[in-house]
Image: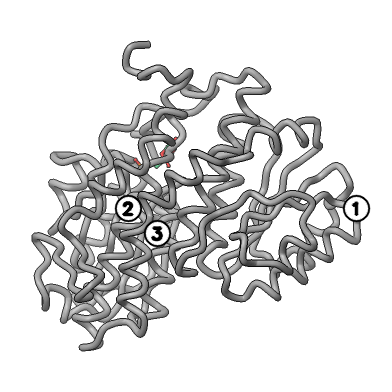
Amino acid sequence: DAGKGGYDHYMLKEIHEQPAALRQTLRGRADPTTGDIDLEDFPAGTFEDVERVQFVACGTSYHAGLVGAQFLSSGGVPAQAFLASEYATSQPPVDEGTLVVGVTQSGETADTLSALRRANASGARTLAVTNVVGSTAARECDDALFIRAGPEIGVAATKTFSSQVVSLGLLAERMVRDVTGSRTDDARARLEALSDLPGHVQQILDYTSARRVAENYRDSEAYFFIGRGTVRPVALEGALKFKEISYEHAEGFAAGELKHGPLALVTPETPIFAVFTGRNDEKTLGNVKEAEARGAPVVAVASDGQESVHQYADEVLTIPDTHPDVAGVLANVQLQLLSYHAADLLDRSIDKPRNLAKSVTVE
Ligand code: G6P
């Protein structure tokens, strides 16, 4: 218990460690005033021969990989994310112009190691994005970028997701510059938003209403999470976290896909958690209205400035105003807190959920 530092669970402690973890992740790596990036072992030009990037990962790390692929694609570098377990059976074409990035907190997940080995054997260059110096992934890959989140004990990943997304944001900026020869359009604004993240996460921790929201919906039949673009992975992650620790039925969907099937499940007993970033919000709002028309309660995760969102939502989990590419990290902190409190109200084994392991070393 001493290790929990006064918190009831490691998970809650680790959620609260995020401002400090993010400061470590960012330390010395980005200067929002000049727009410069300094990623230690990856000076300018490191990635100039990269033609495409493939992310391989599992669980929460896969969701971070999905965000990373979007950062790269929107900057002009072809990129995709794959579930590591699927990569083994249906490997996409790779050559020496392919960089395969394994995103793995522990650096020991068997599926991810297997995908990286396969990529390496096919002639791809490999890079581990990991929290553990000296891990198998860090040792076996050509290169490693450390996310510097500090040790994570709770089985459900929290602070490492935030530090992965920030690390991938910095890595993507480096790669876009190397491959395309120019900075992303709004590089400085994005770097500034990344630098503001520790303070913004602290604001959420200080003012969240996640426990009250969890209490309001504790007897629901199922919990659905929606988002589009850079926050579709956040919707998936919100649902994964919720099911992992509460054992309640939770699913995440691309907001636009709701009408293509999942809407059949929507009733007044299935709250919809909708994530907004300030980009493409009108479309997501349209999807929210489809759910609302079926009687579903709507909880928005959005900033105060998004008035039209506030008008339609039954409840809002508020996030500070920031760059749309960075808003997902903040929204995810609110969803981590929601899952934590939902599980705590149900008296679940939060730090060690049934049937799950922190690091899965079998395929
Ligand atoms: C396990 C954990 C998840 C984690 C996944 C990938 O399933 O329970 O929380 O996201 O492994 O772990 P990694 O260490 O590769 O990021």
Quote the CA–CA distance across marks 2 and 1.
Answer: 39 Å
Is 313 on the left-hand or right-hand side of 120?
Answer: right
For the residue marked with disc 1, what is the amino acid?
Gly
For the residue marked with disc 3, what is the amino acid?
Gly
Q: Are marks 3 and 2 in contact (CB under 8 Å)?
A: yes
Q: Residues within 10 Å of mark 1 (few under 14, many from 20)?
A: some
- The residue that appears at 30% across and 42% down in the rendered structure is 21
Which mark identifies residue 65?
3
Which mark identifies residue 198?
none
Quote the CA–CA distance across marks 1 and 3.
Answer: 34 Å
Image height of 83 relative to 245, above or below: below
Quote the CA–CA distance across marks 3 and 2.
Answer: 7 Å
Q: Position of residue 222 (x, y in %)?
A: 76, 41
- The residue that appears at 31% across and 60% down in the rendered structure is 195
Front tag of 1 and 3: 1
Is 123 on the left-hand or right-hand side of 359?
Answer: left
Of mark 2 and mark 1, the one earlier in the sequence is 2
Q: Residues within 10 Å of mark 2 (few under 14, many from 20)?
A: many
Q: Quadrant of ligand 1?
A: top left
Is 260 on the left-hand or right-hand side of 59?
Answer: right
Question: SS at mark 3?
Answer: helix
Please name the colour scheme applied to the rendered image. one colour
Where does label 2 land, which residue?
103
For the residue marked with disc 2, what is the amino acid?
Val
Q: Is mark 2 within 8 Å of ligand 1?
A: yes
